[in-house]
Amino acid sequence: MTIAEALENVQQIQIRAGSAEVYETAARELACRTGAPVLRLKRLERVRRAGVFQITDRPAPAGRRGQAAGDWIQIRLRKDGSGFVASSSPHFLYGALVSVLDAASDRDVTALKTGVTLAPAFTWNRTCYDLFLNQEGRVQRGLNRETYVRRLAECGFSHVEVNGLAFPMGLETGPRGEVYPMFYTYCPALDQFVHSRLNKGLYPFYYLSANLEYLKQNAALARKYGLVPGLLCFEPRSVPEEFFARYPMLRGARVDHPFRSFKPRYTMTIAHPLVREHYAEMIAALLREVPELGFLTVWSNDSGSGFEHTKSLYVGRNGGAYMIREWRDEADIARTAGEHVLAFFRTLRDAARRVNPSFRVITRLESFYGEHDTIWSGLEEGVEVETTSLIARGWEMPYTHPRYPDSRQINGGSVYQLAFAEQEKALMADLERRSSAAHFYFAAGPHQMFAPLIGVPYPCLTWRRLKLRWENGVRHLSHVGGTSPPELVPFNVNHEILRRFQFDPAMDPGEEITRLARRWAGPDLAPALVEAWVSAQEAILAFPNITTLYSTIGFTWYRLWVRPLVPNIEAIPREERAYYEDFMCTTPHNPNNVDLSRDVLFTLTTAAKSRLDVERIDTNLWPPLDRAIARLDGVAEQASATFGPRNVIADQVVRLRALRCWFMTQRNVGAWIAGVYGWMEARTRADKARHRAALRAMMNKEIENSRELTRLLDSGVEFMATTDKGETPLMHGSNLKTLLQKRIALMERHLDDEPYIDHRYTEKMAGRMLGGD
C-alpha cells in the first residue's frame, strides 16, 4: 500500500486547541486532501483508533525513539490511516507534511508504520533579497503572495524576509537625469515603515502606513505557514535633506555614489546617542506591530547607505563630528569605525529583544574590508554574518570557475560556486564558540545568475551544491532571490530538489530526479526530460561568465536584450536611442552607454578575455544545449497529445530556448567588445577586415536571436520576470516585443557602420546640459 492510499483511510484529523496557526493550516491542507473533518481538542491523547491522524507540536511517546537533537519532525502513518506528524517548531511542520503528501505519496507506507524522525538539513533556510515578495519583482505580473509563501514552506524554508514597499517605487527623488532613486526601491530601510520621535513627519504617514500594512500582510502569511518573518534593510540609509535643516549637527556620512548620483546624500550620524535611540525606537515599534519578527539583515555602504568613516564609502572615509578626531592614523580610524558599526548592531538587537528574546541581527562583511578584523572579533550571540565565503576580504572571490580555473568571474552562491575550502570550517567554528553563526549564500533561481530568467533547470547541480555545504557543516543558508511564483514556474525542479534534500539529505539525487521526471512527464517521456536536464547542466557549466554584472541585475539594468549591438552606438541618433536609454539604470555620462566593457570608472572585462569567452562558448556551450533542446523537441508532439499543450516538456523547452537566447546575447556582448576594440586597435587592413567581418556575423546572430526571443514571448510560458505596472530600469515591461522590433530595425540599418568608441565620452557628456544637444 502506498502512502497516498493509506491517507485515504484518514477519517478524523486532530489538533490541539490553541496551537500555532500553522497547525491549523496543515490540518486544513490534510483535510482538503482526505476529506476528513478537523477536530480541535483541549488535549491530544495517544492515537489508538484507526483513521485518527494528529498534527501536534509534541512528540508522541512511541515516537521519542531516535528523536534528533535540535530541530526534528516525526511522522507516523499506518495502513488504517492512523498516525501523527509532530515538529519541534513550526518552521518545518507544513513543509514536512506536504513533502509526504506530494514528494513521497507513491512510496510504500510500511516505512512509516513505526514512525520516522526527520532532521532538516538546514536549521535556517532563509530567503535573502526575496526578489518577488519584496524587491523589484514585487510588481511581477501574475504574482500571488500567498501561493508564493506557501511554496517557500513546501520547499523547507524556515525564515522569510517580509519588508517590501507597498508602492512600485520609493519616495526618493533626485535631479533630472539621475537614476539613483531606483536604488531605493529594494531593501527598504526601517524608516520606510515606522517613525521615531526624532524623524516623525519626515515621510508622509499614509506612505508609512501602506508600507507597514504590506509588511504585516507578508508576516501574516509567514505565520500561517509557520515561517519566521524578518527584515532585509540597507542601513543606515540616507534621509531627506529636510532632516538636516532641522538637525544640522546630526549629519553623518555621505553615502551616495558620486558617479551615479547628482546630489549628495547623507545618513544620520550613528555616533550620536539621539540617533541610536531613533533606531532603537523604530525597531521596537516594528516589533510591537509584528512581535514574531525574528531577524534583521543589514546590507550597507551601497544603494544610499553606509557607516561613518568606513573605508568602502564611495567618497572615502567621512562622517559626523562625534567619532573621529583629527590626525588619527588609518588603524585608529578603522578600529573606531568598526566599533561603532558593532554598537549599531547591538543597539538594534537589544531593542528588538525586549519583545522577541531570540531576535538576531545579521550583516554581510564585504563592505567592511577596511574594518574586517574589528567587526569579526565583535560578532557574538545575536550578531551574525552572511557571506559568500568567510575567507574573503571585501569583494574578492577565493574560488574559481569550476571549468575554467583561470577565471574568478563567478557569482557568489550561484551554480558556479562549487568548492568549499577547509579554512571555512575553522572560521565557522570560531563563530559557533561565540554563539554566533555564518549564513552562507545559496541561489538556485530566480536571482544571482541568469537574470531576468526564471525556472532555469539544473537539478543535479542544485543537489551537488546543497550536499557540499551540508557535508561541510553549514546549517544556515541565506537563499538569495527566494523562489519563483508557482503560477509562473509550475515545474520548479531546482527547488523540488531543495525540498527533498532539506528533509532527506541522504537522498539519492538520480533516483529523486527520475521520480520527479516520471511524475511530471510519465514513464515514457521521463528519460527525455532527464537527458535534457543533464545536457543543459553541461552547457551551464560551459558558460565562462562574460562579467558578473551582466549575468545578474546588470542584464536588465543595461538593457542588453533591447539595446542594439551596433559597431558605433553613437551613430544611432539620440532620439532613436531614447526608447531604451530612458529606461537604462545609468547616468547620461556613464561610458557603458557606448562601451559594453565599461561601467562608471571601472572595466568590466577586456577584449582579450572576451575573445577567449566567445571561443569557449562556441566550442563548449552550444553542443550540449542544442542537444538538450533537440531531445525535448523530439518528444514535444507526444507530450502534447498525452498531457495537453501546457505540459512539462513544452514548459522546459521554452525555458531552455530562452536560456539559449540569454547565452547568445552574452556571447555577442563578448564578440562586440572583442570586435570593436580589435578593429580600433588593428594596425593592418587585413586585421580590420577580420574584426569587421566578425562584428557583422555577431550582429546577424543577435538579430536572429531577437526574433527567437520575440517568438518565445508568444509561447504562453512565463520564462522571465516582467511587470505589467509599466517598464522600470529594474524590470522589463509588457512592451518588450515592441522594443525588440525597434532593436532589430536599428541593427539592420547600422550593420555596416564603422566601429568606434569615444574614450572621452564621460568628459564629453559631463560637460553638456541635460536635455541639450
Image (tube, helix red, strand yellow):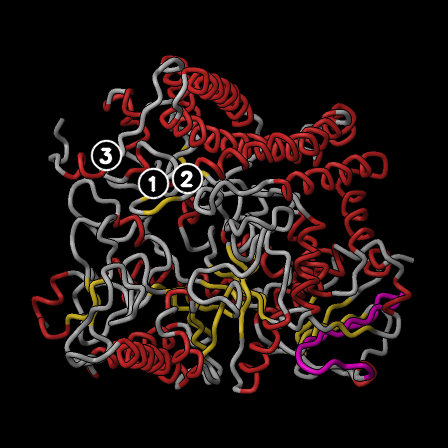
Residue 71 colored in magenta in the image: yes
- Look at discs 3 and 2 and give the one toward the viewer: 3
The number of discs equals: 3
Q: Quadrant of the C terminus?
A: top left
Question: Start and end of the magenta stretch?
Answer: 65-87
Please, is residue 756 above or below residue 273 in the view?
above
Say the numbered circle drawn on residue 761: 3
Residue at 20 percent of width and 79 percent of height: 324
Coordinates of residue 19 in the picture (x, y in percent): 60, 77
Say the numbered circle drawn on residue 729: 1
Residue at 14 percent of width and 35 percent of height: 770
Coordinates of residue 306 in the picture (x, y in percent): 29, 66
Residue at 53 percent of width and 81 percent of height: 431
The numbered mark, 3 or 1, whose residue comes first in the sequence reads 1
- Residue labelled with disc 2: 556
Q: Quadrant of the N terminus?
A: bottom right
Callout 2–callout 1 Cβ contact below 8 Å: yes
Q: CA distance from mark 3 to mark 1?
A: 22 Å
Task: Tell me if residue 23 can be seen.
Answer: no
Residue at 75 percent of width and 55 percent of height: 103
